[in-house]
Amino acid sequence: MKYKRIVFKVGTSSLTNRDGKLSSSKVKAITNQLAMLHEKGYEVILVSSGAIAAGFGSLGFKKRPTKIADKQASAAVGQGLLLEEYTTNLMLRQIVSAQILLTQDDFADMRRYKNAHQSLTVLLNRGAIPIINENDTVSIEELKIGDNDTLSAQVAAMVQADLLVLLTDVDGLYTGNPTSDPSAERLTKIEQINQEIINMAGGAGSANGTGGMLTKIKAATIATESGVPVYICSSLKADCMIEATEKQSDGSFFVAQRKGLRTQKQWLAFHAKSQGSIWVDTGAAEALTKNGKSLLLSGVIEVEGQFSYQDIVTVYNNETGQSIGKGRVQFGTSAIKDFLQSKKAKGVLIHRDDWISITPEIQLLLTEF
């Protein structure tokens, strides 16, 4: 068995009919494949969209709503209906499913991050299939393009999965738009995500879904940098999940980086919220990004924002103006400003164990599209 622990992400367009409503037959096809993989000994996690699609019809909406409050209300109704579909189908095979609703705050707060990881570990060890979704009913900021693409990558990194499979209505990443460009070719293997790959990614997906290829590239970045390979393929094939696990012949495979980030570094890079900004001189920037050194107070040029001891900040190269990474500070804003005025204090501001360098490509994908 090449892979043991696999995270699958299925989008709204892969679960709905043309009218935008949930398709029981499509949900059944997904759960049947999950059950087959589970019975073969795989540990599987499903990150599923579809709550809004499952609920809007019951509230009398003729089509998928666009207003935030309407989406939240639809998700409140649909979340239970969606889970009922999954649970009923899996129980026919004597497989227990578990619902987990997450928001970005569950990843940004280190204690909640660890709790989520522990819960998922217990569920997998006990033979359950966790079914995860964004908590759309209470979240506002998170109801945005690609939320579950990103969520699936965060989950895959958290549980140190062996593979992340992004199921969508296209069969991978193309050099152009295959619907309008007959010369467009599918990329079967991507060794590294760079600016060229980002430029190939298109815009928004279908009218019913909320994700486009660009958000899948963002998800692939988070996962591969964390040591998890990613496979993007079409959900339209009958055995797409089985094939993604065992063959991988009709999609785009993103190779995991050899030095995958450990949990603390993953959290710093992709989840921790920055509370301020620090500008450093060129020497300090090189020490951090090239030499694996800590950041000393003597390398600081300027500080912005109000942050305290142990907060996370973003660090910029003062000469280039570019962000170079994030880290946990040993001094707050006031102490750093006092040093800048007196130049008497000495010491380590960010220890190298509490630092993560972030390349321009990753930084681009971590910003809003």
Image (cartoon, rainbow, N blue to C red):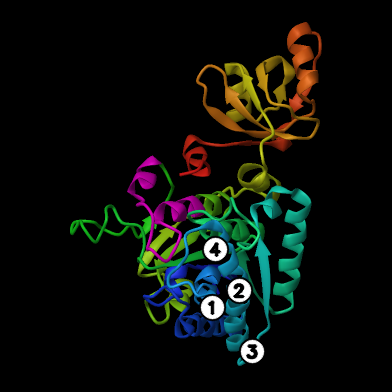
Q: Earlier in the sequence, mark 3 or mark 2?
A: 2
- The one of 329 and 102 positioned closer to us in this rendering: 102
Q: Amino acid at mark 1?
A: Ser
Residue at the image point whose x is 35% and y is 44% from the top: 199
**Disc 4 from disc 3: Cα separation:** 32 Å
User: In this view of the protein, can residue 190 be seen by the observer?
Assistant: no
Q: Which residue is mark 4?
A: 70
- Secondary structure under tag 3 reads helix
Classify residue 296 as left or right of residue 242. Answer: right
Q: Which residue extends farthest front?
A: 60
- Front tag of 3 and 2: 2
Q: Which residue is mark 3?
A: 91
Q: Earlier in the sequence, mark 4 or mark 3?
A: 4
Q: Which residue is mark 1?
A: 58
Residue at the image point whose x is 19% and y is 56% from the top: 183
User: In this view of the protein, can residue 16 be seen by the observer?
Assistant: yes
- Secondary structure under tag 1 reads helix
Q: Earlier in the sequence, mark 4 or mark 1?
A: 1
Q: Which residue is mark 2?
A: 77
**Magenta residue span:** 195-220
- Front tag of 4 and 3: 4
Residue 314, quarter of the rendered image: top right
**Disc 4 from disc 1: Cα separation:** 12 Å
- Secondary structure under tag 2 reads helix
Q: Are marks 1 and 3 in contact (CB under 8 Å)?
A: no
Q: Amino acid at mark 3?
A: Met
Where is 272 relative to 75, above or below?
above
**Disc 4 from disc 2: Cα separation:** 11 Å
Q: Earlier in the sequence, mark 1 or mark 3?
A: 1
- The one of 267 and 168 positioned closer to us in this rendering: 168
